[in-house]
Image (cartoon, rainbow, N blue to C red):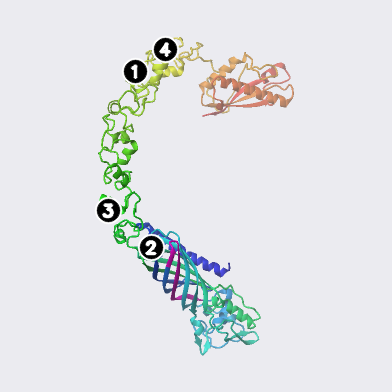
Amino acid sequence: MTSGMFHSVRHAAGFLLVMLFLLAGRASAQKVTYGWNPEGMLVFGFEGGLTKYFGEFIDQNYGGMGMGHVKYFILPELGIQLNGGAGNYVYNRRLRDEFKDAYARQFFRDPRLLGLTDYPEGNFDAYADDPAMRTHILETDKLWFAEARVIVNLFPARWVNPYLSVGAGIMRYENSNAARKVDGQPLLNVTFGNKPFTVDTPTGLVTDKSSLSADANTLPIIPVGFGFDFILTETIALNADVSYRFLLGDGKDMMDGFGKSVQEDFNKAGRVDRTKSTENPDSWGSFTLGFQIYLFGHSDRDGDGLTDTHEEDMGTDPLNPDTDGDGLTDKEEIEIYRTDPLKTDTDDDRLTDAEEIAKKTDPRRPDTDGDGLTEGEEFAHGTDPFDTDSDNDGLSDGDEVHVWHSDPLRSDSDADGIPDAEEVLVHKSDPRSRDSDGDGLEDGRELELRTDPTLKDTDGDGLSDADEVLKYHTDPLKADSDGDGRSDGEEVAMGADPFLQDSDGDGIPDGEDECPDVAETPNGYRDEDGCPDSEPLTTELLTPGKTIILEGVEFEEASATVTPRARITLLAAVQTLRDNPDVRVEIGGHTDNRGDAEANRKLSLLRAEAVKLFFVGEGIDAVRLSTRGYGEDMPRANNATSEGRSRNRRIELKVLAAD
């Protein structure tokens, strides 16, 4: 695609986008009236609008035009069109740097520029660079055209019909500069009809004949278009059209009096510098608005007994005997049943008008018996549209469906032995569920036990009513069965006996015992809390960086197996960690220097991991513990002696953080 064609297509696309935007807004406000079938119809139309020139000079200027057309539709989707019209096209003729020397030679006589009347001597460069040459000259030229097109309707059965068109035709344009003279000399430096023209060259003036024939301004064209028909009535429509026309033939680039032909003729005349330019083939587009008249319509084309005119007045479809598709003809709806022929369901009860007529309900009233259910809902649920309480349970069908969501055909929807009305009005339970609170006891059983069927835990002790009755055999109406100050739910959760005041027999009542399921260890350390414990390694405040050596933690020779003797120290360390729940520590393993250093490092890490495993087994969160094997790198004493090596084989706790 040439640069000129690209610019032309771009501007045409701009027209189309603007039209789509405007028409989309129009479509959103229009009401569909009836289907439209233009098959076999002859259409006369008249339009007026704007023209847009595309070529070397493409400033945004618009001309005016008028047009008439005749269409005939072979099919609803396919038609042929003959159209013709006249108008003008407007552009700003001005110098562009891409072809300034050629432009200066072509228009130097124009008094609106330099105003010269004689050929200038020497080179044209001085004139091409003269600011006067850059003056914008508004040109208005005439055009006439006639075209034949094929029309393709995209949605022919709708009130708004977009269409595409393509065809062929002929046009004639009148370039005003071609006939304009200055001091007896033609304004243009190129002529039509193979007439002579003169071009200056470095060696003097050269006269040659134009390559353009006398009728070069009469051209074949290829129009392409996109538009909309807005159907107002069966015979009247509005039309909006955007078209773009490609020009063919020798004169296709001379609508503006300048282009490829000028360059070729100048070069033919002997310009040794061979003037060049980025020429754009000429073309033009149009945007029109108008109206159309459709002839040869039908009086009652759908045979429904209503004339087309009557249907148009009512807003029904003159091409469809049942506009709303509800099973009743438009005439039956309008004249017999007084329903809306434009609505399938006049009363919006989810039954079509024809269904209501068949079932003998009123198609104009959504709820015949006034029970809160529309006719459509009554038939969907199988209830009686003439009875407000189909199951005679004391609740209206509408309340059962919309409020309580129970079965309007069963007096006891969940078969729990309690009528729906009693459930919702007296006990406030769910008529759809045999176990309203989901506690494992059916509503009927809960009423026998005097528990609340809407509460899982009637006494609020943390145990569901079903667990109390069926599993623990405690009283679902009493929160603390043994009266020890701790609820049944708490005792069960802690492993205590809800029927014993001192479940572990350590002398501390369960209500005061923090560990009611295990006995206190009487060792002088926190003997009053009722929990087994060990004396901690230290009661000092643990701060980051503090290190505690676990004295007495020994392992089997050359292994990571903790000896039984080490358990006492490790339990004390566990108690320390329990007393400081926000502390995170590093468990560091150390060895003496006997053996390979790398083997010692691995052994020390294994021993640290063994200690961590012990701590986790005693309930310390693993997230609080990290391990590291230091091997022989950090001795406390001299490895030359047995005593020193014994001190170096150790486990240390290093406080990393105290959150």
Q: In this view, does 612 lie to the left or right of 310?
A: right
**Is there CB contact under 8 Å for labels 4 and 3?**
no
Distance CA(mark 3)–CA(mark 1): 69 Å
Distance CA(mark 4)–CA(mark 3): 88 Å
Residue shown at 74% from the left, 22% from the top = 595
Q: What element carries label 1?
A: loop
Q: Which amino acid does label 3 sit on?
A: Ile
The reply to whether residue 487 is visible in this rendering is: no
Q: In which quarter of the image is residue 361?
A: top left
Q: Is residue 644 above or below residue 381?
A: above
Taking depth in this image into account, of 62 and 313 the one nearest to the observer is: 313
Disc 1 marks which residue?
Answer: 477
Disc 3 marks which residue?
Answer: 334
Taking depth in this image into account, of 537 and 609 the one nearest to the observer is: 609
In the image, residue 635 lies at what x, y percent?
68, 23
Taking depth in this image into account, of 597 and 334 the one nearest to the observer is: 334
Disc 4 marks which residue?
Answer: 509
Q: Nearer the viewer, mark 4 or mark 3?
A: 3
Taking depth in this image into account, of 67 and 41 the one nearest to the observer is: 41
Query: What is the residue that sits farthest to the bottom in this orientation?
Result: 184
Which quadrant, please, contains the N terminus? bottom right
Q: Which amino acid does label 4 sit on?
A: Pro
Distance CA(mark 2)–CA(mark 3): 27 Å
Q: What residue type is labelled 2?
A: Phe
Disc 2 marks which residue?
Answer: 230
- Residue 234 in the magenta stretch? The answer is no
Q: In this view, does 288 lie to the left or right of 398?
A: right
Which circle's residue, 4 or 3, is located before the other in the chain?
A: 3
Q: What stretch is highlighted in magenta?
A: 72-93
Q: In which quarter of the image is residue 163?
A: bottom left
Q: Which amino acid does label 1 sit on?
A: Leu
Q: What element carries label 2?
A: strand
